[in-house]
Image (tube, rainbow, N blue to C red):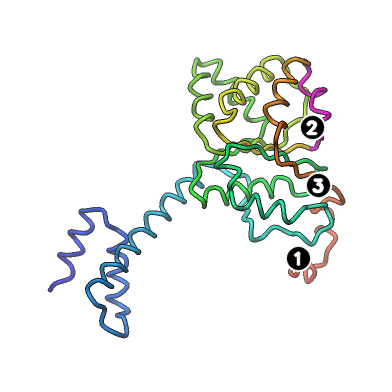
Amino acid sequence: MLLEPTLDKLTALQLHGMVDALRQWQTQPPREPLAPLDLVGLLADAEWLYREHRKLTARLKAAKLKLPACVEDIDYRHPRGLPKPLVQELVASRWVAAHQTVVLTGPTGIGKSYLACALAHKACRDGFTVVYRRVSRLYDELAQARADGTYLTALRRLAKAQLLVLDDFGLEPLGAAERKALLDLLEDRYNVAATLITSQLAPADWHGVIGDATVADAICDRLVHGAHRVQLKGESLRKTRAALTPSEKSTK
């Protein structure tokens, strides 16, 4: 049986994983002949893995994560109050499936964004759609959408993400338009999708940044009530690592 006509037919059927597997076996044949059922099973596995990889690549591209972080590389050795049992529980992504919230707080440089991106990356690997936004740029994005008449469309697009990461909340006081945009977004996502938010400020200080007491109550109720809380502390990781020698950095 000629292989190339078979490969052409599989390509026409868009079974590219099977094509790749057959080409690999053509150059590196199995040591022992495969039974027909075993061959079909291996080809099915190859196609499934190929499609899962493509879907993961698409999810990661759409997420636009700030950092190439993964949970396997989280540093638990630096003394910053990172609770390993809680993080390992979050790594399972059950909180994403349950439409819950994670609040990461702590000083600048302590690794909040890295931890947020690592959990978001794991959620992508677990099959969830993710969107990452730095909060200041989110406000700019929604302001532009309001100006060109696509505000509701932008909100719906953000609301569809199974996990929304809001990074660096509270760096500047909110204006009326920003308060409304944030509340609109959280209202659309409340109890239907998961949210992860990072901030240098503890939630008790968010009212002062949000400004309007009534809106602040509504926003904090949607973000903080029942949330998984991770409060980091200690020296900046960036500062600590900058002081290491090259050989020391290689061991961290």
Magenta span covers which residues? Answer: 200-211
| Disc nearest the viewer among 2 and 1 | 2
**Label at residue 232:** 3
Q: Secondary structure at mark 3?
A: loop
Q: In the rendered view, does 23 fall on the left or right side of 227?
A: left
Q: Within the magenta stretch, is there residue 217? A: no
Q: CA distance from mark 3 to mark 2?
A: 13 Å
* Of the image marks 2 and 1, the number of the one nearer the N terminus: 2
Q: Secondary structure at mark 2?
A: helix
Q: Within the magenta stretch, is there residue 203? A: yes
- Please give the residue where the numbered disc 1 appears in the rendered image: 252
Vertical arrangement, residue 121 with respect to residue 17, above or below: above
Instruction: Write the residue at 80% across / 53% down.
Output: 237
User: Looking at numbered disc 2 in the image, what kind of residue is underneath it?
Assistant: Pro
Instruction: Write the residue at 81% across / 47% down.
Output: 232
Could you say where residue 4 lies in the image, as x and y percent from the top left? 18, 67
Residue 247 sits in which quadrant?
bottom right
**Would you call the spot at circle 3 few (<14 residues within 10 Å), some (14-19), or many (20 or more)?**
many
Q: Quadrant of the C terminus?
A: bottom right
- Please give the residue where the numbered disc 2 appears in the rendered image: 203
**Would you call the spot at circle 1 few (<14 residues within 10 Å), some (14-19), or many (20 or more)?**
few
Instruction: Write the residue at 79% across / 49% down.
Output: 110
Q: In the rendered view, does 148 fall on the left or right side of 206?
A: left
